[in-house]
Amino acid sequence: MDSSPSVFDVIIAGCGPTGAMLAAELRLHDLRVLVLEKETEPVSFVRIVGLHIRSLELMAMRGLLDRFLVHGRQRPAAGFFAAIPKPAPQGLDSAYAYLLGIPQPVLERLLEEHAVELGAQVRRGCAVAGFEQDDEGVTVELADGERLRSRYLVGCDGARSTVRKLLGVGFPGEAARTETLMGEMEVGVPPEEVAAKVAEIRETRFWLRPFGNGVYSVLVPAAGVSDRAEPPTLDDFRQQLRAVAGTDFGVHSPRWLSRFGDATRLAERYRIGRVLLAGDAAHIHPPTGGQGLNLGVQDAVNLGWKLAAQVGGRAPDAVLDTYQAERRPVAEDVLDNTRAQMELSSPEPGSQAVRRLLTDLMDFDEVNRYLIKKITAIDIRYDFGEGPDLLGRRLRDIDVKTGRLYGQLHRGRGLLLDRTERLTTGGWSDRVDHLADPTADLDVPGLLLRPDGHVAWIGDDQQDLDDHLARWFGEPVG
């Protein structure tokens, strides 16, 4: 273990959902964590964001889901892929098979509060201006000249990440070809008139979807509006609605207004030495399918326990290296499926022909199910070597004798779920919990769960289990 003095174990740049979730994950392992956020105040615009199934599972694993449910609205897990309206598949492999729509300020506040409750420090109005790393840590310089010392630095500072740029990591991909306006506002015409007009329009990047109380989510192409460097205005929306629909629907009283492009980029590396990237700092893509926030939160849960083990000297470098090895291919897949969805949104005849064909194909349950599982991230399987199909996948929240499985994962530790009642965690009991339960709803004798809920081992042989405990959790104690 590195014994040189450090003010912090980990400094995180950015207190969005990814940064806040990572801070909380690190605090579960008692690391000294500082989160630097350049904005002085939390986000205030009331944009509704969606937590997909896999993110809901992670919240349940950390005992957070009830906090979110009281502020959100549940919707069926349906219609995500290219906004093609198909019903939710029946019997999805999750106890949380729905979308939770929740206001973005509430989501970010709850995650930040969770991190602070666990002991993370958050400093607002502090921007990273530079850093230098050496064999023992990272010296971070703030915009006001203050210098801080940490063992590791993680850039969770968004698409224009300062950390990524200073680190010199390439961010290849495609620049934006199309831009779209998106916002929430009230309309000044009856709902029937809105619905009738929307039904007439063939433009796929166009909708007015009711939220209730006269408020609509509005999406419309941004071609020809004001400078993209400036925030869009309500007049921009009115102009584009008239261009596309022949009416501006009397829109007024906006809750929030934004513009997004279809730029698609992926960091060449997620780690150089003691500096890592997560969330939008590592990958950007169009928001179609609502995957971006979820992808970042899932990055954080994958990284947190690994980085904590590295700081604590309990795991070899190979464990931290699995962060990039596992998460970068997931991001590549998300980038590809958003590229495909954007093509299906093009008004070009060929794209529309493919969209009609896919719409027909999604009437087959297997196709619809495949795409929903992809968007919601419950189909991910990390490569842990040969073994049963469950190996490398996350385990659903099953019934166990203590209640629900995810209730055993609140502390961010590993878990041995043992139906044989003969296995033991031995010298790893300080890092891995043991639940002996012959009644557990499983068709395998035993399995080892990592702190992120992915199955790292299946079997009933103690020596084989010990080998895998050492692989993921380091050397035993005693």
Image (cartoon, grey):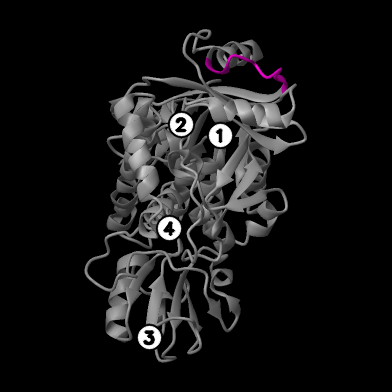
Residue type, mark 1 in image: Leu
> Which residue is labeled 2 in the image?
140
Q: Nearer the viewer, mark 4 or mark 1?
A: 4
- Considering only order in the chain, which callout, 4 or 2, is on the residue closer to the N terminus? 2
Label 3, label 2: how far apart the Cα atoms are: 48 Å
Structural crowding at the residue carrying mark 1, measured as other residues with C-alpha within 10 Å and reported as few (<14), some (14–19) or many (≥20): many
Q: Nearer the viewer, mark 2 or mark 4?
A: 4
Residues in magenta, as a range: 244-253
> Which residue is labeled 4 in the image?
378
> Which residue is labeled 3 in the image?
445
Secondary element at tag 4: loop
Instruction: State yes or no: discs 1 and 2 in contact (Cβ < 8 Å).
Output: yes
Q: Residue at x 70, y 31 (%)?
A: 192
Image spot of residue 93 (x, y percent): 46, 66
Q: Residue at x 40, y 64 (%)?
A: 454
Label 1, label 2: how far apart the Cα atoms are: 11 Å
Please indicate whether residue 459 sits to the left or right of residue 309 in the image: left
Residue 249 located within the stretch drawn in magenta: yes
Residue type, mark 3 in image: Pro
Label 1, label 3: how far apart the Cα atoms are: 45 Å
- Considering only order in the chain, which callout, 2 or 1, is on the residue closer to the N terminus? 1
Counting every numbered tag in the picture gives 4
Label 2, label 4: how far apart the Cα atoms are: 37 Å
- Considering only order in the chain, which callout, 3 or 4, is on the residue closer to the N terminus? 4
Image spot of residue 65 (x, y percent): 63, 58
> Which residue is labeled 1 in the image?
36
Q: Residue at x 49, y 56 (%)?
A: 54
Image quadrant containing the C terminus: bottom left
Instruction: State yes or no: discs 1 and 3 in contact (Cβ < 8 Å).
Output: no
Instruction: State yes or no: discs 4 and 1 in contact (Cβ < 8 Å).
Output: no
Structural crowding at the residue carrying mark 4, measured as other residues with C-alpha within 10 Å and reported as few (<14), some (14–19) or many (≥20): many
